[in-house]
Image: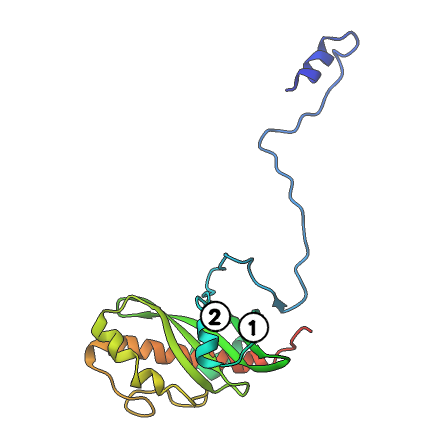
């Protein structure tokens, strides 16, 4: 209780006066209605939302996959209302990370040159982060593994010729080793399957997200 309230009780005529004092643990909650839009700008710079993977080298990847690019934007599309369509196209029930898609449209002047998606998958030895550069039509223009804990021999199998085989593929391709992707040594197979599956998932999410209104 503050000194002012104590003084009031000591003054004549204040003995029977009740002074409401909020408990020390009381908290004020402010209700804010949910945003009606399905598109938002994402976290502040330097922050990463759970399930969203940062694009760690935008400048290098733009130079690598989009020569002449002048900039990029970042958007997050919410796809939770498309669960049934996603389940049908993925061939499985969508997981939490499948219901948010972080995308980075790349521009060359006023023209959209393509889009970059970043996907995280679980490899044999830990998380693998993959950058996918897409054409405006949704085909892979190039791919790079931006972070991985796989040992040297496995990384050697997952890069070079094997990763280059992603180029030109879309969500409708098989994405199977020994079919439309080169085979890899047994030690790298589990991680390769995870990367290929993650690429296919990202492309399906992008195709579904393209059907959403851009939000202006």
Identity of the residue furthest to the right in this view: 13
**What residue would you read off at disc 2?**
58
Q: Determine the residue positioned at 34% across, 92% down.
A: 180
Image quarter of residue 6: top right
Q: Determine the residue positioned at 67% across, 73% down.
A: 215
Answer left or right for 184 relative to 103. Answer: left
Answer left or right for 194 relative to 116. Answer: left
Q: Quadrant of the C terminus?
A: bottom right
Mark 1: which secondary structure? Answer: strand
Q: Quadrant of the N terminus?
A: top right
Residue 119: where, in percent of width, then height? Answer: 42, 72
Q: Determine the residue positioned at 56% across, 73% down.
A: 71
Mark 2: which secondary structure? Answer: helix
For the question of whether residue 78 can be seen, the reply is: yes
Image quarter of residue 35: bottom right
Q: On residue 72, which mark appears?
A: 1
Identity of the residue furthest to the bottom in this view: 179
Q: On residue 82, which mark appears?
A: none
Marks 2,1: beta carbons within 8 A: yes
């Amino acid at each position: 209780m503050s000194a002012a309230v104590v003084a009031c009780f000591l003054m004549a005529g204040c003995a029977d006066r009740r002074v409401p004092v909020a408990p020390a643990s009381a908290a004020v909650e402010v209700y804010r209605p949910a945003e009606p839009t399905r598109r938002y700008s994402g976290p502040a710079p330097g922050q990463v939302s759970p399930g969203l993977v940062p694009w760690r080298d935008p400048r290098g990847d733009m130079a690598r996959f989009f020569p002449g690019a002048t900039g990029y934007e970042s958007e997050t599309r919410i796809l939770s209302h498309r669960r049934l369509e996603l389940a049908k196209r993925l061939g499985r029930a969508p997981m939490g990370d499948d219901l948010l898609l972080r995308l980075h449209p790349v521009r060359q002047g006023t023209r959209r040159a393509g889009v970059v998606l970043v996907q995280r998958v679980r490899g044999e030895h830990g998380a693998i982060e993959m950058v996918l550069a897409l054409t405006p039509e949704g085909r892979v223009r190039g791919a790079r593994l931006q972070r991985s804990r796989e040992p040297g021999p496995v990384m050697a199998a997952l890069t070079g010729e094997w990763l280059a085989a992603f180029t030109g593929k879309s969500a409708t391709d098989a994405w199977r080793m020994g079919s439309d992707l080169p085979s890899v040594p047994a030690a790298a197979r589990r991680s390769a399957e995870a990367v290929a599956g993650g690429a296919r998932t990202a492309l399906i999410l992008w195709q579904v997200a393209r059907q959403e209104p851009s939000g202006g």
